[in-house]
Image: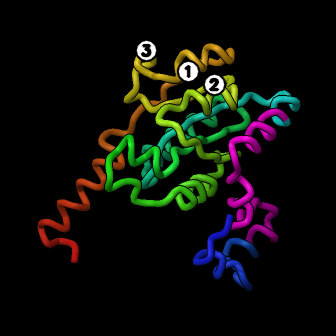
Amino acid sequence: MSYPRIGLLRRGFVGPGRAEAAATGKEYMTLRDSEKRVTTLEEAQSRVKAARAEGKTIVSTNGCFDIIHAGHVACIEIAKGYGDFLVVGVNTDESVRRLKGPGRPVNPLDERMLVLAGLRAVDVVCSFPDDTSVPFVRAIGPDVHVKGGDYAVEDMPEAKAVAEVGGRIELAPLIGGRSTTNLLDKINDLFASGRLP
């Protein structure tokens, strides 16, 4: 996967955190580290198999993740707390359009996946073209599947698939009012009122 605009930052770039990381032994994540976490569903399955062989608990979550906000980050952090290896499934652009409408996604798939891969809690990010996460869940076979608390388990299309693979569903509490739709509405209101150029 290539990111030409971002790739320019790689050449000769020394971030302020790199020297500190070297001096203190702390982890320092580069763009290349993030890119390594972005993979195909097939490669994600292979990494899950290896993680499971090491005795790790596999956790999954999924969504459109169009404009990452605090609610997304909280859900991902909570998800990681349920296990050792977190796989995030992301709806493709075509899938988002079918689910959210013709103006979405705001950000293309490769950029949405790269942003998610930059979160420390995430081990692997892959995409799926389906309107529900059922095939993603069946492919990954998580021990725990986490969704935001705005869902009811009985209404989740993937609930049966999670049970079929021997997993369980956990709901992450919502951070009030945080959603991509609300964020886009707020931006549109700011433009309409003239408060944004």
- Residue at point 79%, 40% (across, down): 47
Quadrant for residue 9, please give it: bottom right
- Residue at point 61%, 14% (across, down): 163
The image position of residue 144, as x and y in percent, is 63, 24
Above or below, comparing residue 53 to residue 75 in the picture: above
Above or below, comparing residue 154 to residue 20 in the picture: above
Above or below, comparing residue 155 to residue 129 in the picture: above
Circles 2 and 1: CB atoms closer than 8 Å: yes
Q: Which mark is residue 169?
A: 1
Quadrant for residue 12, please give it: bottom right
Residue bounds of the magenta highlight: 20-49
Q: Which mark is residue 154?
A: 3
Q: Which mark is residue 144?
A: 2
- SS of the residue under disc 1: strand
Quadrant for residue 2, please give it: bottom right
Q: Closer to the camera, 26 or 7?
A: 7
Q: Is residue 43 magenta?
A: yes
- Residue at point 45%, 22% (across, down): 156
- SS of the residue under disc 3: helix
